[in-house]
Amino acid sequence: MMNQAHEVLKQVFGFGEFRPNQKEIVSALLEKKDVFAVMPTGGGKSLCYQLPAQLLDGLCVVVSPLISLMKDQVDAAKANGISGRSF
């Protein structure tokens, strides 16, 4: 199935190769394994779930803590006396 993944990577997403760790994550998802992946901003997380969703039947569920993480960071900044116009 990884041959199909490379085709989708190129045809749908316009990339010739995976970024670091993407291939292993996509491969595990295509094998229908549970995956917990933590990647840096700009590391290509979206592709890791969007690509398998193109190849597999069924529903793709993604749980992203980003909004709650941002709220926690703002709350912590306020608690530490940091203020700003964006809060």
Image (tube, rainbow, N blue to C red):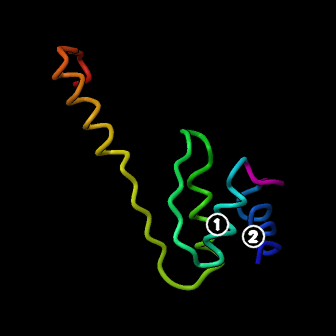
Mark 1: few/some/many CA within 10 Å (<14, 14-19, 20+): some
Mark 2: few/some/many CA within 10 Å (<14, 14-19, 20+): some
Cα–Cα gap, marks 1 and 2: 7 Å
- For residue 43, what is the image quadrant? top right
> SS of the residue at dot 2?
helix
Say if the magenta span includes residue 64.
no
Q: Which mark is residue 80?
A: none
Q: Nearer the viewer, residue 26 or 42?
A: 26
Question: Who's the residue at 76% across and 78% down the image?
Answer: 1
**Mark 1 lies on residue:** 51
Q: Is residue 34 left or right of residue 69?
A: right
Task: Magenta stretch: give its range.
Answer: 15-19
- The reply to whether callout 1 and callout 2 are in contact (CB within 8 Å) is yes
> SS of the residue at dot 1?
helix
- On the image, the x and y values in percent for residue 81 come to 17, 14
Q: Sequence order check: which comes first, mark 1 or mark 2?
A: 2
Question: Who's the residue at 59% across and 40% down the image?
Answer: 42
- On the image, the x and y values in percent for residue 29 come to 61, 71
The amino acid sitting under disc 1 is Leu
Above or below, 75 against 39 in this view is: above
- For residue 74, what is the image quadrant? top left
Identify the residue at the far bottom of this view: 57
The amino acid sitting under disc 2 is Ala
**Mark 2 lies on residue:** 5
- For residue 13, what is the image quadrant? bottom right
- On the image, the x and y values in percent for residue 62 come to 44, 64
Q: Nearer the viewer, residue 55 or 32?
A: 32
Majority SS type along the magenta span: loop
Above or below, 44 against 4 in this view is: above
- On the image, the x and y values in percent for residue 49 come to 56, 64
